[in-house]
Image (tube, rainbow, N blue to C red):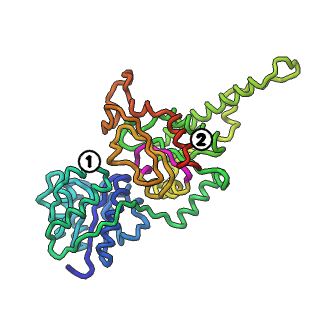
Amino acid sequence: MSKKTKILIRAANWVGDAIMTTPVIRAIRKSYPNAHITLLAKPWVIPVFSNNPYIDEIMVYENETRHNKGLGTLRLVKDIRKHSFDVAILMQNAFEAGLITFLAGIPVRIGYNTDGRGLLLNPSIKMDKRLKKGHLIDYYRGILKGSNHKFCGNLRHFIDDGRKLDLFISDVERTEALKTLASYGIDSPKKPVIGINPGATGGTAKRWFPERYAELAKRLSEKFNTKILIFGGQADKELGDTINKIVSQSNAQTINQANRQSINPQSSNQIVNNQSDNELINQATPICVNLAGKTTLRQAFALIEKCDLFITNDSGLMHAAAALGTKQIAIIGSTDHIATAPSSPNSVMIRVPVPCSPCLKVHCPKDKGDIDHHVCMNKITVDIVMKKVLQASLKI
């Protein structure tokens, strides 16, 4: 092989999965410190790899435009072929990934023999069933380990550089995050920054209930005298608004009740001021700040890094918090808690075992009238989450 080995890495297609491949990218760089490493990624996961010092170049897989199926696939093959890569390492398991790199004429194509693509790979790594039962980080690391047992011409063995996740935030991004927090009045060193992430891609099964997130936000705000940030993408904006509305209504009702209880019935001179809940909502300082749909993914990463506590469903942002070392509580229901648990000593996972979990379904398959509908999440109460918050390991 040439001294300047040219390596193409086909990135995973989901934010959380992409973050869990970062130990592999670091290991590739440390195995080939002088190589030119290019990452092929779809647009929505590219922010995961911004500022990553182990990558030289990012090639955009424009799957909805230039590289759309059919002629677009052939156009992508042509674009890849121009670079004359020596090695392709496929984090993605799909047949397409094997086909594209085969047609692009990359001599060494490393990946698992999944999705019927074994003959397109060189070497083809046999899937170890034990890896499917473990964490996805180790599943991805197994690609390099498996290739070390195959003859690949002059390809050197890959080192293993552990399981640590990487997510690199720039100083400029940190400064902007502080400005964003200050614009919402969250800039006191005496008050913690707390974020919640009530959404999750791939359906409602992974989501803890918005009513419970609202109750949790209210309790956290009262306990720590701070505002609560609501994270999420554009698709989560309405969910964030719903939680904000529930919190505001609950807070107004609490204030009104306190006002009524403070009235002294023995005093004939006292003027009763029984405002409507809507009036109180309009007058009160909001408890929650709904950032859903208002930040880019990079801006969300930078804000999560500033959080003293982050409470989330199983999601890409959960893995981001793990990579950033942010203290977090992850609420797990329908998903595989072994395969996708947040990999960080600062992460605590809440899960109540039930017979039907993990079901890995998009939505709970049980009827809404069924007593066991969404039971994996129903059994996780606000009290359970607050108890974890108040434990010594998560003091803020």
Give the residue drawn at x 33%, y 27%. 366
User: Considering only vertical position in the picture, is 81 above or below 392?
Assistant: below
Indicate left or right for 6 with 125 as reference: right
- Alpha-carbon distance for marks 2 and 1? 36 Å
Q: Does the magenta segment cover residue 106?
A: no
Q: Residues within 10 Å of mark 1 (few under 14, many from 20)?
A: few
Magenta region: which residues? 307-318
Residue 167 appears anywhere in the view: yes
User: Considering only vertical position in the picture, is 386 above or below 306?
Assistant: above
Q: Which residue is mark 1?
A: 133
Give the number of marks. Answer: 2
Q: Which quadrant holds residue 61?
A: bottom left
Q: Position of residue 211 (x, y in %)?
A: 51, 32
User: Considering only vertical position in the picture, is 55 above or below 381?
Assistant: below
Q: Position of residue 206 (x, y in %)?
A: 39, 39
Q: Which residue is mark 2?
A: 220
